Every structure is written in structure tokens, then in C-alpha cells.
Image: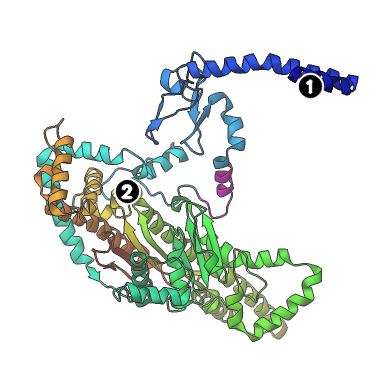
Amino acid sequence: MAAELREGREQAQHPDQQQQAQQQDQHQARSRPRARARGAGRAAAPEARCPYIIAHKGRPCGWPVKPGAAHCGHHVFAATGGGPRRVPCPANPRHDVPASELEAHLRVCPDAVLAAAARAQPYFSENLNAGDRGGAGAEGDGAEGRSAAELAAEACASFLGGTAAARQAAVVAAGPAWFAALVAKIDAAHAALSAAHPLSRRLLGGCGDGDDALRARARARDPLMPFDAKHAAQYASLVGNMAEAGLLAEPQRTVFVELGAGKALLSAWLHGECGAGELVLLDRQGSFTKKADRRLRHTALTRAAVDLKDVALLPLLALHVGGRQQGQEQAQEPQQAQQQEQQQQQQAQAPEQVARSRGGLVCCPAAPRALGREGAVPWVAHGKHLCGAATDFALRACLHAAQQAQQQAQQQAQQQAQQQAQQQAQQQAQQAQQAGQAGQAQQAQQAQQQAGEAAGGAGDRFVLRGVAIATCCHHRCGWRAFVGKEALAAHGLGRAEFEAIAWLSSWAVCGHEAPAALSMATAQRGDADAGAGAGYHPAQLLDRESRMALGLRCKQLLDAARCAWAAGVLAPALGAAGATRAAAGARRVTYVDASMTGENALLLVAGAGGQGC
């Protein structure tokens, strides 16, 4: 029946259509056996997968391999040493490329493109805040003849995997006698530095009012802002301690720089508390989900993606303050000239409304910003939970910015003094020639004195008022970046002791939320495994409470050494040039209860412009 229908259809079709139909039938007849053969082959022989274990993912590669090969093309060299040699990408070592294609890869690698764009920024200065290996009684820097990549790797070594294992192995190899002497040194140094820089407890900003009160305050400012009671209490206390130290005295005229900003929720809370309108957000990662930038779009906001190790804060501040005006001039069009004049007149009549209307990376057309006393721009650096060496990078960045601002102010003052002296000398010379008056030398001397007084009264353009940084993750501290080397060296603690102290600091927050019996059993099990090969482990000498107490003393010792450095080096550099610095100082603060977070230490530094510490 089907054959008869096919014959009837073929007779009704055009000869060309009949030929096309026959060709299609022949093609289908030829393709069906091949398809059945391929399906049978796949069922009989499953596709081989690459078994190479990716270390940072902890799983096999799983990529299909060629027939007869054991590994994929990416891992054949790492597994067997055969095939084309592959090298890590300099921009991101997490992926590798064939060595012969490295140059071509760097031209298109997204990480390399982003890194090149970051290096081209005026605020990028590689390894500016990396620190040195020196210190009182320590070896020299040894940076001569070393590449920038080597210096950066050493500065960031504490963030790499394997650091804790290496430090533990060094402590175990030193033996129990060395460990006992180290504990004695830690106790003596902790007692001395704690007496010089005591730790005060200041739970401010309503952080103890309860979750409902904090939620009501947050919802009153922004009902859509994400709320977390644990973090909200920390934000409230941090801002409260900053206010008590006088760092929020003039929030409308002060630029607040958040270091390690992340989602900028601390800056959002700060804006809600005091109305801060000049915000600079700095983080090594450029993009975040659910960040607060959109909530702060009505402020003058600048976000920069740069590592704290490589940031120069003064050019970044100059870009924030001056870049808006440059962007405004570049965006002007002839047709908008009249509209701009009308806007400027309205802004001159309502300056408070102008401050709220500016937003984004480049402000909308607005009147020039009031820079404060004698053209100086006050700024404050703050950050919450800067991990390990990032705290030291941030402190060095603030110091370099303050010192650079003072140097620029002195140079400007000298230039102004020279110009004024030359102008006055020329005027006096002309007057002396015309009138023939005597005493020209005396008048010139008076002119120089007046020029010197004018130069001495010129203030810094950028004045750092203070620094507020909540520290954390002391086990991530590194010797090269650490700022408190001299304070530790004064108590006989060198690099070997520092590495051990950084490792021991993790004991302060290991299992403190678990029940004592469970934590002790887990600790004993881990200690037995860790000391199985060597027969000794420092944790075996102490019980759970003693381990936590020793770890807490190590954390406090590192913060006290930082505080000693800040009091002796950073605090004197803060404040306006020529102003009294009697109020400058540094202190350590417990800003929230330990039951909320074990990382509850705040390093607060105030300059002469604040109320002191």
C-alpha cells in the first residue's frame, strides 16, 4: 500500500522534484548505518577523562582526552613532563598557557588587561606600602637587585597557602625548650606594651541597644538596605568611636576614605549617622554584588580597585577632589552654557541642596567645593577587618600620604615665599630709585620676614585627621609588611619569634564557639595527628583555655606593637602644618563584645585636628 502511494505521488510530481526526492532518500539511506555505528561505539567505549588533580579545587580535571592519551592538553606537561611546556600566566597564576604563546596570551588575557589598566592609574605605585625586612637589630632590606615581582611575593607571602604549615613546622623543629622561652618573652612583651598602650573597652554608637533598635535605626535611613544585626552593631560602635575621637567633627567638609571597603556598608552607615558626603571606596576587588554604591549615589563617590600594597592615597584624593571639576569641564557643550549659568545661580542660593545633588564618580555641574581652612581638605581613613598584612599596608599608605602632603605644602610655601620676596624686592628697588630713600636693606629684610610668615601660615592641601582600622586575621601578618618590628625587637623578638607569634595568634579564635568538651576532643585528635611524626607538638603542652589565652595575648601583642609605631611615627605626621600636635596619639579599643566576634580590636589614631586619643 505504501509503495502504491509513493508511486502515485511520484507520478504527480514534477520531474525535477522527483530527482530531488530520490537524492534525499539515498542520502538518508547512507547516513543511517554510520549513525548507528557511532551510537554503538559510544555505548561500548565510554569517553576517557583527564585524571589530573587540580590542587586549588581538590578534584580531577575531567576534561576529555584524545584517543590514546592519558591526560588533556592542559595537564599533560604537568603530569608527565611531555608535550609543550606550559607556564603560569604572570597576570593570574591560577591558569597557565604554553610558553610559546605567552606573549600573545598577555595581549588578550582579561586579567592582564585589567592589571595594565590599574598600573596606568596615577594612584598606582607598585610596592609603595610593602615595607622592608629591616628593623631594629634586624637584617637590611635586601631589595637591591630584586625584581618588583619578588618583592611583592615576599610582602604577600602570608596570604598564600602553606604559610601556617611552614610556621608550625619551624616551631615544632625548635623544640619544647625554645617554645617555653618564647611564651615567657611573649608574656613579658605583652605586659610592657599593654602598660604603655592600654586596651580600653568602648562600646559606643548604641551597639548594645539590641537588634530591634539597630534594625529600626537602619530601616529609618534606608528601608531597602540589607541588615545584619551582628555587622550593624560593629558599624555603630566603629562610627561612635570615630566620633568620640573627633574624626567626625566636620563631616560635610571631610573626605572619608574606606580602606578594604568591600560592599561599602560601613561607609553607608557612616553617611547615615553624620551625613558624610565625600566618600572614597578602595578595595583590591573591583566588583561586588549587593554593594551600597547605589544607595550612596547622591554623594560625591569614588571607587578605586587597587591593592593596598600599591596605592598612593594622595593622588587618589586629588583625583576625587579635582577630577569632578575636570569631568565637568570636559562634559560641557556650547548649547548647555546658559543652562549651566542658571544652575550655578540656583546652587549659590541653596548650597545645602547642592551637596546632596552630587553623585557618582564625576559630579554633576556644581559650584566649587569649599575646601575648608586656607584651602586645606581634611580626610579620614577607616576600615573594618583589614586582614593581616593589609592593616600594615593601610597604615603605611596613610603615613606616606601625610608625609607627601607636608612635603608638597613646604615646597609650595617656599615657592610662594620666593615669589613674594622677589616682587617686594622689585617694588622696593623701584621706590628707592624714584624717591632715593635710605634704608633699602632694612626694608628688604622686613619683606623677607613677612614672606616667611606668609609661607609658614600656608596649610596642607590634604590634611589627614585620623585613622580608624579594625584589625583581624593576625595569622595573616607578614614580617616584611609589619610596622611594629622595632617595638618587638625592643623585647628580644625577631623574625623567627614573629612567625611563631603570628601562627599562635590563630589559637585565640579556634573553637571558642564550640562546647569545651567537643573542642578539647577535637584539639586532642588534631594534636595527635600533627605530632605523630615528630613526637611533639606545642598544643600538647596546653589545654584549651590556655591555648586560647595565649593566642589572644599574641593578637594583642601584635596590635600593641602597631599602636606603638602609630603613636611614635604616624600620629606626629597627622594634623595641619604648624598646628600643635599635643592632642595627637594612638590607642587600642575593644569596640564590641567578644561574644559577638573574636576580631573586636580597633586601632584608633587621631591627629591634632581631632580630640586626641
Residue 362 inside the magenta-drawn segment: no
Q: Is residue 50 left or right of residue 319?
A: left
Between circles 2 and 1, the one closer to the viewer is 1
Q: Along the line of sight, which residue is nearer the eye, 22 or 576?
A: 22
Bounds of the magenta span?
Answer: 113-125
Say the numbered circle drawn on residue 302.
Answer: none
Where residue 518 sits: x, y (%)? 15, 49
Secondary element at tag 2: helix
Q: Is residue 209 left or right of residue 181?
A: right
Residue type at the position of mark 2: Arg
136 in relation to 292, above or below: above
Where residue 116 sits: x, y (%)? 57, 44
Where residue 217 sits: x, y (%)? 40, 76
17 in relation to 286, above or below: above
Question: Who's the residue at 62% across and 64% down the image?
Answer: 323
Residue type at the position of mark 1: Leu
Which residue bears the numbered disc 2? 476
Q: Is residue 258 left or right of residue 177?
A: right
Residue 120 inside the magenta-drawn segment: yes
Which residue bears the numbered disc 1? 5
Query: Can residue 240 be seen here?
Result: no
In the rendered structure, which disc, 2 or 1, sits on the residue that comes first in sequence?
Answer: 1
